[in-house]
Image (tube, helix red, strand yellow):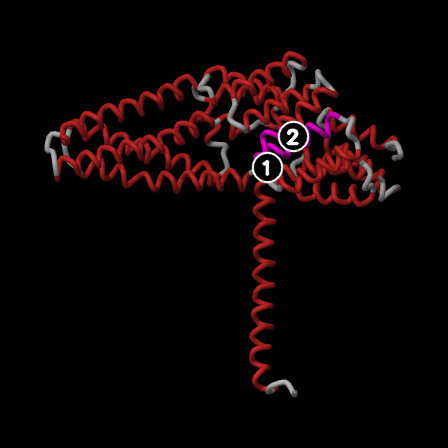
Amino acid sequence: MTSPPSAYWRAQRLAEVGHYAEAERIAREGLAEAPSDGWLLTLLASVLRLKRDYAAALRGADAAVAAAPLLADAHLERAENLIVLVRSRDAVDAAAEAVRLDPQAASGHFVLARALAAARDFDRARAAAAHGRTLAPRSVEGLLTVADVERDAGNREPALTAARAALAIEPDNAYGRWLTAMLDAERLKVRRSMRALREVARDNPARADVVSMTWPIRGVLSGLRRGLAASAGLVCVLLLVAHWWWTPAGFFARIVSAVLAAVMAGFAARVLIPAGRLPWRCLALLPPLMRRADVAGLALTALGIALLGVFAAVPWWPLPVIALAVTPLLWLLGLTELLGAGLEDPGSRQALTDWTEELRDWWRTTKKDLRDAWKDDEAGPKNGPAPR
C-alpha cells in the first residue's frame, strides 16, 4: 500500500485540533489532483463524520474502499460511519475486514469492539477490545472502548474504572470526561456529574452537549413515568377491592397513595435540587419537539403526583383514576421525546431517512410486481389454453 501524500498529513493535523473546515479544504484540494487517492478519501470521510455530515461521510468512505480496497483505514472509517448510522451489522463486517487486512493495528480491534457492542454482541466485543489492548496496553482509545462496551452492557462499575484509567493517562480527554460524567449520572451522583458536564461544555463550547446536561430532568421524568403508573394502578386496585370485597382496603389505599406520592416527590427532589439551575437553562435549548414533550411531561407528572397526594386527604375515588389515566399520555410523551432526540441526532436522522427510502422502494417494487401479476392473470384466459 502506498504511503499517504503530504496533503493528508496537513489535513490530519488540522482535523486533530478541530479545524475541520480547513482540513476538508486541503483534503479536497489534494483530491482534485489525485481523485482516486484512498488515503485522502478516507481522511475526507473522517472529517465529514466529525462535522456530523454522516451521509456524505459514508459516501466518502465507500469511495475510499472502492479506490483502495486493501487499505484497512478505509474500511475502519466506513465502519465508524455505519455505527453512527445505526447499521451495526454492516459496521461489524466492515471492521472485521479492516482487522483481516491489518491484524496488528490495535485501532481496528477497538472499532470492531464498538461495532459488536452496537450489535449487542457483548462477549465478542469484550474479546475484541481485550485483543486490541494486548497490542496497545496504554491506549486511551482502548480503555474508552472498554468503558463504552461495559456501559452498553449495563456494567457501570467496570465502565467507570476503565474511563478513569483513560483519564489518568490523558486527563483532558473530552470524551473520557463526558463518559465519566454520564456514568456518574446513571449512579445518581448528581452534583459531581453536573459539575463535570459543565466543565466539558466550558472547554468545548462549539460541541456542548445540551441534551446530556438536561439528564436530571429527563431522568426524573423517566423514573416517575414508571412510578406513577405503578402507584396509581395499585391505588385503583385497592379501591376495587374495597368496593367489591373488603371495605377497609379503601383506607389502606389512602395511606398507600400518601406514601407513594411522598416517595416520588422525594425522588424528584433528590435529583433536581443538587442539579441546580443548569438543566433548566439547557431545557430551553433543546430541539423544539423534545423540549415540548419534556415540559408537557413535567406538567402531567406533577399533576398525577398531586392527585395521589390530594386523595390521601380527600377520599374521592376519581382522583387516582385520573392519575392512572394520565400515564398513557406520559408514555406517549416519552416516545415523542425519543423521536425528537432522534431527529436532532444526524446519525439517527439519516438512519430514519434511509429506512424510509427503503420502505418506499419496497412499496414501489411490490406495487409493480402486483400490477404485473394482475396483468398476467388477465392475459391468461384471453390467450386461451396452451396448445397441446
Question: Which kind of residue does numbered mark 2 sit on?
Answer: Ala
Helix, strand or loop at label 1? It is: loop
The quadrant the N terminus occupies is: top right
Q: Residues within 10 Å of mark 1 (few under 14, many from 20)?
A: some
| Residue 232 falls left or right of residue 384 | left
Helix, strand or loop at label 2? It is: helix
| Residue 158 falls left or right of residue 102 | left
Task: Say if 271 sits above or below 61 in the image.
Answer: above
Residue 119, numbered circle: 1
Question: Which kind of residue does numbered mark 1 sit on?
Answer: Ala
Question: Is 83 in the magenta?
Answer: no
| Residue 42 falls left or right of residue 149 | right
Residue 254 in which image quadrant: top left
Residue 113, numbered circle: 2
**Residue 55 picture location, percent across and down:** 67, 44
Residue 342, numbered circle: none
Residue placed furthest toward the left: 247
Residue in view at x 75 percent, y 33 percent: 99
Q: Main secondary structure of the magenta part?
A: helix
Residue in view at x 60 percent, y 44 percent: 350
- Comparing 163 with 268, the one in front is 163
**Residue 181 picture location, percent across and down:** 53, 20
- Comparing 324 with 101, the one in front is 101
**Residue 41 picture location, percent across and down:** 79, 39
- Comparing 372 with 353, the one in front is 372
- The magenta stretch is 106-125
